[in-house]
Amino acid sequence: MPQAITVAIPKETSFALKKGVAHLNWVYYTESMPDQPAADKDTITIRVSRALKKRLQKLAERRNESLTDVVLGFIEKAVRGVELTAQDYKQIAADVAEAEKRIEAKKSKKKNQ
C-alpha cells in the first residue's frame, strides 16, 4: 500500500511543477491544508511506496532536515528549468489574493462563533 507525503509548496513552484513536469503522474493537487493557512502556498500529496518513504525519511535524518524539506528540494530541482510567463505570475498573484480572502473569511467566521 503506498504511503502519502503531503507538503506545502510556494505557488510559484506549484505553477512550474504543473507546467513543466506533467510526466510526474504521482502528484495529486489539493486545495490547502487546514492547519497550514498560507496564502502563498499550495499543497500537494504524493503517493510513494513504503520503502521509498522510509528512504526519504532516512535521508532527511541524515541531512538533519524535515521530510518536507527533502521533498521540496527535489521538487524545486525538478522545476528549475521551467520558465513562468508574465501571465503565469498574474495568475499566481490572483490565486494568492483569493486564498487570502478565504483565510480572512475563515478567521472572521471563527471569531464570530
Image: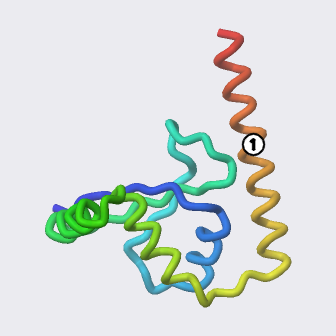
The residue at which mark 1 appears reads as: 100
Identity of the residue drawn at 79% across and 66% down? 91
Q: Position of residue 40 (x, y in %)?
A: 68, 54
Quadrant of the image containing the C terminus: top right
Viewer-proximal residue, 93 or 54? 54
Identity of the residue drawn at 51% across and 44% down? 33
Q: Could you tell me the amino acid type at mark 1?
A: Glu
Callout 1 crowding tier (Cα within 10 Å): few <14, some 14–19, many ≥20: some
User: In this view, which residue lies farthest toward the top?
Assistant: 113
Rendered position, 21 above or below 33: below
Rendered position, 96 above or below 77: above
Left or right of 14 on screen, residue 8:
left
Quadrant of the image containing the N terminus: bottom left
User: In this view, which residue lies farthest toward the bottom?
Assistant: 81
Q: Secondary structure at mark 1?
A: helix
Left or right of 86 on screen, residue 61:
left
Q: Quadrant of residue 73?
A: bottom left
Q: Position of residue 100 (x, y in %)?
A: 75, 42
Q: Quadrant of residue 63?
A: bottom left
Viewer-proximal residue, 80 or 88? 80
